Image (cartoon, rainbow, N blue to C red):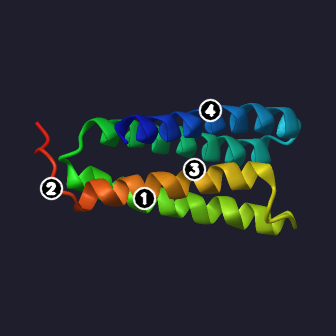
């Protein structure tokens, strides 16, 4: 399960990088919109990073709860994006949303399990 957890965190990294490239290509002539889009890219990469950290620190419930909250928030944001563009099955929002929900499940499991204490 630890490997699957990390795979989904790396999928989120890839999604964040692709979001950054897509944002730049789509909004390079709209600096204000580009700034906010790149902020979402940064959020995605930071969320992926703390999920990778959590996957290696099973005994750290505080980190797991932070990941859980962040993943849920990102899932809601991704699915809201899909709804706002008029296609709840849009690949961009769905991949981010599903990945975040899977990571939220792993985070909840980490937060509520009695693993080894973090060093």
Nearer to us: label 4 or label 1: 1
Q: Which of the two labelled residues, at mark 3 and mark 1, occupies the earlier sequence position?
A: 3
Q: Circle 4 — which element?
A: helix
Q: Which of the two labelled residues, at mark 4 and mark 2, occupies the earlier sequence position?
A: 4
CA gap, disc 4 to disc 1? Answer: 20 Å
Q: Circle 2 — which element?
A: loop
Expressed as whole percent of the image width and height from the top left, the position of residue 111 reads: 26, 58
Q: Circle 3 — which element?
A: helix
Q: Residue at x 69, y 64 (%)?
A: 79
Expressed as whole percent of the image width and height from the top left, the position of residue 55 reads: 33, 40
Q: Residue at x 87, y 67 (%)?
A: 86
Dot label at residue 105: 1
Q: Which of the two labelled residues, at mark 2 and mark 1, occupies the earlier sequence position?
A: 1
Q: Residues within 10 Å of mark 1 (few under 14, many from 20)?
A: some
Q: Which residue is mark 3?
A: 99
Dot label at residue 24: none
Q: State how many labels appear.
A: 4
Q: Which residue is mark 2?
A: 114
* 102 sits to left or right of 92: left
CA gap, disc 3 to disc 2? Answer: 24 Å
Determine whether label 2 and label 1 are within 8 Å by CB.
no
Q: Which of the two labelled residues, at mark 4 and mark 1, occupies the earlier sequence position?
A: 4
Q: Residues within 10 Å of mark 4 (few under 14, many from 20)?
A: some
CA gap, disc 3 to disc 1? Answer: 10 Å
Q: Residue at x 86, y 39 (%)?
A: 26
Q: Residues within 10 Å of mark 2 (few under 14, many from 20)?
A: few
Q: Which of the two labelled residues, at mark 3 and mark 2, occupies the earlier sequence position?
A: 3
Q: Circle 1 — which element?
A: helix
Expressed as whole percent of the image width and height from the top left, the position of residue 105 reads: 42, 58
Q: Which residue is mark 4?
A: 14
CA gap, disc 4 to disc 2? Answer: 31 Å
């Amino acid at each position: 399960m630890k490997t699957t957890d990390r795979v989904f965190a790396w999928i989120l990294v890839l999604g964040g990088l692709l979001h950054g490239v897509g944002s730049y290509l789509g909004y390079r002539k709209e600096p204000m919109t580009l700034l906010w889009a790149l902020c979402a890219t940064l959020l995605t990469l930071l969320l992926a990073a703390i999920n990778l950290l959590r996957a290696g620190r099973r005994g750290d419930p505080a980190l797991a709860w932070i990941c859980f909250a962040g993943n849920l928030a990102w899932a809601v944001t991704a699915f809201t994006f899909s709804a706002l563009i008029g296609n709840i099955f849009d690949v961009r929002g769905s991949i981010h949303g599903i990945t975040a929900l899977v990571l939220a499940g792993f985070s909840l499991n980490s937060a509520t399990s009695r693993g080894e204490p973090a060093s």
